[in-house]
Amino acid sequence: MPHTSLPDLLNRALSVLAPGAIVVAYSGGADSHALLHALAHDAQARVRGLRALHVDHGLHADSARWAAHCREVAAALDVSFASVRVDVERNGGTGIEDAARKARMAAFAAQLLPGDILALAQHRDDQAETVLLKLLRGAGPQGLGGMRGLREHEKVYLWRPLLELPRATLRDYAQANGLHWVDDSSNADTHLRRNFLRSEILPRLGERWPDASAALAHSANWARAAADFIDDEARKALARLQGLDPTTLAWRGWLDLPDALRDAVLRLWLRDLGLDEPAHFHVEELERQLRDAAGDRLPCVRFAHTELRRYRDLLYAMPPAPTLPTNWQAQWGGTPLALPAGGRLELSPQRQIENPLQVRYRRGGERIKPAGGAHTRELRLLLQETGVPPWRRARIPLICRGDELLGVGDLYLSDAGESLCRELNARIVWSAGVDSTTRLG
């Protein structure tokens, strides 16, 4: 491969980059210093309003001195500079590396404006480390695709223009330009996973396979292309399988998908709903339960703050439902009433009920004759026949006048309940909690 210089690569990348102010994530290390220096000497970057942003993690005794060094470098380059101090959660359970990354990204998000482009100095060797880490975690094509050169993140862009350059090219540039950078001693701590790969594993691989980092980065490009194709197909499959209620999925159709699509569709569905994504063993357990559980069973797989439940032809996704208080009951005069299961009950338009009604949840044995119906029905059977999932039935508010059941949420009204609504010239509206969005059927 012909040698590419850092300035030439950045000049080409800037010529096709979407409009937006460029903000360099400047740690003070050699890589980010080289990136900032090269961009500061590029007219295209200057005209965009180049600036630098430093995050002080407070994890090292010299962190304040490093922040001061970064400020001095930015001033010498005549680049606008800001430094943000963050508190890193040391006992979060996911490791100090992950905690520092989360704190850093939160600081960036707070400082950037919509449309800003955050320039990150990750290079080809960083990409190789990322691919190995993902491989060791059992990642699929999405993870093995490593870091994207450009991606949107919370209304800003993350730009990694150096992914095709090895670390050595950046160090050569820094030395040729007499740059002085911060050396973080924690980078030598091989108890940290990435440092271990960088110091112990990749050098050994390079001894046997000199182009190991380049090959891993090349494989990441292939995996990224495959992941993008799978994502496109997953979006099409999700559109076919998702129910009118977006929290539902046709589970038989999902099981019939090719292996490459099944996991991707599930994760895409959950991401769109703002729910947690499962580990691979949760997906395997879900597949097993859906294939093996008898038709009258109610399979359920739980992980993090998410539950996946099957009922009839649909798979439902939801956060865990709150526990209902025993024998809860409230007076209701028509104004919005917050419900302990989530959501609320109200009249639309708002009206005042002269003699307040009682609202409670099921206690067993309730019966109602739906307005216009010929027979009084047991509520349990009525809800079952109309397809309300079992875990939702206990969370539907019942509207009563003494012992008389007038309404079941806004699903059913008795003749008396319908008459009351006509008198009030209003209708009952039940805004269900997040686990109860489905109506009849």
Image (cartoon, rainbow, N blue to C red):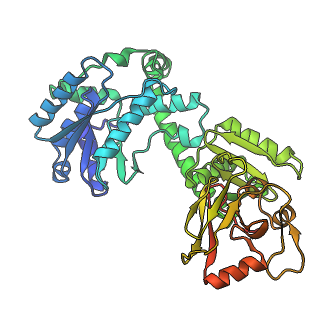
Instruction: Tell me if 293 is positioned left or right of 229 in this view.
Output: right
Q: Residue furthest front?
A: 355
Q: Report x, y in % for residue 171.
A: 26, 26
Instruction: Tell me if 299 is positioned left or right of 265 in this view.
Output: right
- Is the C terminus in the top left, top right, bottom left or bottom right quadrant? bottom right
- Residue at image x 56%, y 51%? 271
Q: How many marks?
A: 0
Of residues 427 and 212, the one drawn nearer to the viewer in this rendering: 427
Q: Is residue 406 above or below residue 120?
A: below
- Residue at image x 39%, y 29%? 100
Does residue 43 show up?
A: yes
Of residues 366 and 231, the one drawn nearer to the viewer in this rendering: 366
Q: Report x, y in % for residue 260.
A: 67, 47
Q: Report x, y in % for residue 298.
A: 82, 49
Does residue 161 show up?
A: no
Q: Is residue 116 above or below residue 245?
A: above
Q: Report x, y in % for residue 427.
A: 63, 77
- Is the N terminus in the top left, top right, bottom left or bottom right quadrant? top left
Instruction: Tell me if 245 is positioned left or right of 41 in this view.
Output: right
Q: Is residue 174 above or below residue 225?
A: above
- Residue at image x 83%, y 47%? 291
Instruction: Tell me if 267 is positioned left or right of 7 in this view.
Output: right
Residue 334 lies in quadrant: bottom right
- Residue at image x 59%, y 73%? 347
Q: Is residue 364 above or below residue 167?
A: below
